Image (cartoon, grey):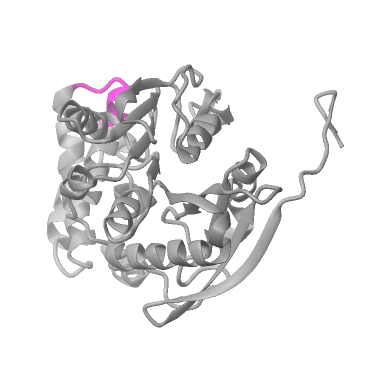
Amino acid sequence: MTFGGETGQRIRLQAQETTFVSKGVRLRGRLILPPGEGPFSIVVLLHGSEDDSAMQFDALQRLLPAAGVGAFVYDKRGAGASEGTYTQDFDLLADDAVAALAEARRLAGARARRIGFQGPSQGGWVAPIAASRSDADFVIVSFGLAVSVIDEDQEAIAFEMGLKGHSPEVIAKGLEIGRAAETLFETGFTEGFEAFDAVRAKYRHEPWYKDVRGNFTHIILPMSAEDIRQAAPRFRFGTPWRYDPLPTIERLATPQLWVLGGQDLAAPSGETSRRLKRLIAKGRPITLAVYPAAEHGMTEFEVGPGGQRVSTRFSDGYYRLLRDFAAGEPLSPPYGDARISGLEARAR
């Protein structure tokens, strides 16, 4: 096989399929280890908000073992080959993650040197909870948040409108729309329809109205009240809208690596970065890496003629950073253009 003029050889990874049980639900997983007897560090790969199969689509299950670090991937409840019902209940998902870590330890046996979690996006709320309930050796959060789900939507509205040049006064009006939409989601679509219709009618013809998006406000913004009522069951996932992750993150003695994108529209990193830097200043075992040009997913992009973002590559150094932290090796910047804080709290 050749790529870019270079000849490559297949790496013979060690894969074990498994089924394990969490809270009465059978989940399907796979342990993938590098060649050799080890021992290896192993990363238990958590999930974002997607409902598709991680065992089929999560590339880290192969990228990490190819670089010398094992991976345990599993389909979340209600997705892929796993049983159960899809949920966004962070407590329940954390229990599933704890069960996955235990299964990875069981399968690896003496080949496991250290083992921890990687939580991308929504998994960034779940991974610290799971670590607080287990014997995890490390936590990695990729493009996740140290604020609530409601705050995520508010920040997303403000950040994108700011990038489009709107004034603070206009952004405040956009946030007013967001709060009305958020009330609908938070109450399970049982309250807030009149207020949402009123604020939309108030601002619908403003030139900036089209730029109000947020993480989930944009989903229902163009829908009629009746359409929203009919669609409501699709949005009831047990999401803990006001969950504040900061106390769990602060109490956690497990070393944490947070990798964030400075241009993330879905999960803006500004307030999360500020909160994590305050914890680093207090001496908490946290390392923060911010890639200034990265979007959600740690991809960099070009802007097309219509203003849309076109992803071009993953941020240089991102995967090496994950690998080094998981392996427990001293971090050795640079990792691309990542701005790193808290190196004294790196994994041991």
- For the residue pair 233 and 294, the one nearer the viewer reads as 294
Name the quarter where the N terminus is drawn: top right
What residue range appears in magenta?
A: 159-167
Can residue 148 be seen in the rendering of this structure? yes
- For the residue pair 296 and 248, the one nearer the viewer reads as 248
224 to 291, vertically: above or below: below
Identify which residue is drawn at 32% across, 58% down.
130
Identify which residue is drawn at 30% across, 60% down.
224
Q: Is residue 258 left or right of residue 112?
A: left
Q: Position of residue 160 (x, y in %)?
A: 32, 31
Task: Please check the rendered image and state whether residue 253 is part of the magenta-colored stretch, yes or no.
Answer: no
Q: Is residue 302 left or right of residue 211?
A: right
- For the residue pair 87 and 322, the one nearer the viewer reads as 322
337 to 267, vertically: above or below: above
Identify which residue is drawn at 30% across, 30% down.
345
Task: Please check the rendered image and state whether residue 161 is part of the magenta-colored stretch, yes or no.
Answer: yes
**Total tally of numbered discs in the picture:** 0
101 to 26, vertically: above or below: above
Q: Position of residue 315 (x, y in %)?
A: 52, 27
> Furthest-front residue in view?
110
Name the quarter where the C terminus is drawn: top left
